[in-house]
Image (cartoon, rainbow, N blue to C red):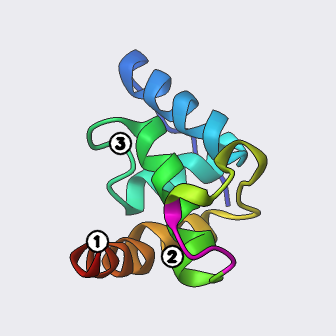
Amino acid sequence: MSETVRVRDEDYEALAAAQDVLGLPFPEVVHLALNTTLLDGSPAQNARRAIQNYYTFVLREYDDPFEVPVDELGFDSADQAKTATTIGAEKRANWADEQ
């Protein structure tokens, strides 16, 4: 089921910035923004951090989030990004405390 959603210009710009980083279709980014804190602060930075979290703390492909080649990676679905912004963010906070 699809539904028309009205988005303010500044929110559209924020969503577009996050979309550029995440590599997801616009409806998926809207879904993610409605269910996470993606638009709080800098959406592009939050999207980068989500990719770092996912590949470091969820998939464990990297040992350090700063080693993740964010420009080369992305998500296949909003659910992956949602996991990264919740579980990955918690694990990242614990990781930072240990450093």
* Amino acid of disc 2: Thr
Q: Which residue is mark 2?
A: 83
Q: Is residue 41 visible?
A: yes
Residue 64 sits inside the magenta stretch: yes
Q: Quadrant of residue 87?
A: bottom left
Which element carries disc 3, helix, strand or loop?
Answer: loop
Depth check, mark 1 against mark 2: the one in front is: 1
Q: Residues within 10 Å of mark 2 (few under 14, many from 20)?
A: some
Q: Is residue 49 above or below residue 59?
A: above
Residue occupying image coordinates x 37% and y 81%: 91
* Alpha carbon distance from label 2 to label 3: 16 Å
In the rendering, which numbered label is found on residue 39? 3
Could you tell which of marks 2 and 3 lies nearer the N-terminus? 3
Magenta range: 61-65
Could you tell which of marks 3 and 1 lies nearer the N-terminus? 3
Q: Position of residue 20 (x, y in %)?
A: 65, 34
Q: Which residue is mark 1?
A: 96
